[in-house]
Amino acid sequence: MTAVSTATVAAAPMSPQEALTRQRIKDTAKSFEANFLSTAISGMFEGVKPDAPFGGGQGEDAFRSFLNEAMAKQIVHRGGVGLASTVEREMLHLQGLAPSPRTPAVVNGSASTTTFQQSTYGRRP
């Protein structure tokens, strides 16, 4: 994989169409990460029985998926687990676009953990 200088990407003017494509790719990558996390979260709650009298029943079963989806979206909103940036980088590559300056660089075949550490530990609610 060839490295692209972030200064080159930042200096190159972007057409409105390219900017729209990049935004759609970013949104799609975040949506993918949220769906993945929602599925993972639902697996964590499988087999967990809530205590009576305040939990359980058909109502909780019906709305559990909405709760899982909301938790997954909040995780992504707070920085996620790094899946969205990887998916975004690959989608940009498939479209023939250089990675955006904010997309983590690949070092020795794996994404840098700097973005994850900054998003997890550097933000306040």
Image (cartoon, rainbow, N blue to C red):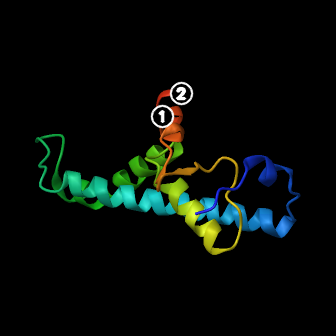
Quadrant of the rendered image containing residue 53: top left
Question: Left or right: 13 with respect to 106?
Answer: right
Q: Secondary structure at mark 1?
A: helix
Q: Which residue is mark 2?
A: 122
Q: Is residue 111 above or below residue 88?
A: above
Distance from disc 2 to disc 1, alpha carbons, whole Å, reads 7 Å
> Can residue 78 be seen from the camera position used here?
no
Quadrant of the rendered image containing residue 123: top right
Question: Left or right: 108 with respect to 16?
Answer: left
Q: Residues within 10 Å of mark 2 (few under 14, many from 20)?
A: few
Name the residue at 53% across, 45% down: 77
Q: Which residue is mark 1?
A: 117
Name the front one of labels 2 and 1: 1
Q: Looking at the rendered structure, which numbered label has been put on residue 76?
A: none
Q: Are marks 2 and 1 in contact (CB under 8 Å)?
A: yes
Give the amino acid type for the residue marked by disc 1 in the picture: Gln
Q: Secondary structure at mark 2?
A: loop
Question: Left or right: 13 with respect to 47?
Answer: right
Name the residue at 11% across, 49% down: 49
Give the amino acid type for the residue marked by disc 2 in the picture: Gly
Percent position of residue 45, x then y: 20, 52
Quadrant of the rendered image containing residue 85: bottom right
Please name whichever residue, 100 or 25, is drawn nearer the observer in this view of the structure: 100
| Sequence-first tag of 2 and 1 | 1
Please name whichever residue, 63 or 21, is drawn nearer the observer in this view of the structure: 21
Q: Residues within 10 Å of mark 1 (few under 14, many from 20)?
A: some
Image quarter hosting the N terminus: bottom right
Percent position of residue 38, x then y: 36, 57
Name the residue at 78% across, 62% down: 19
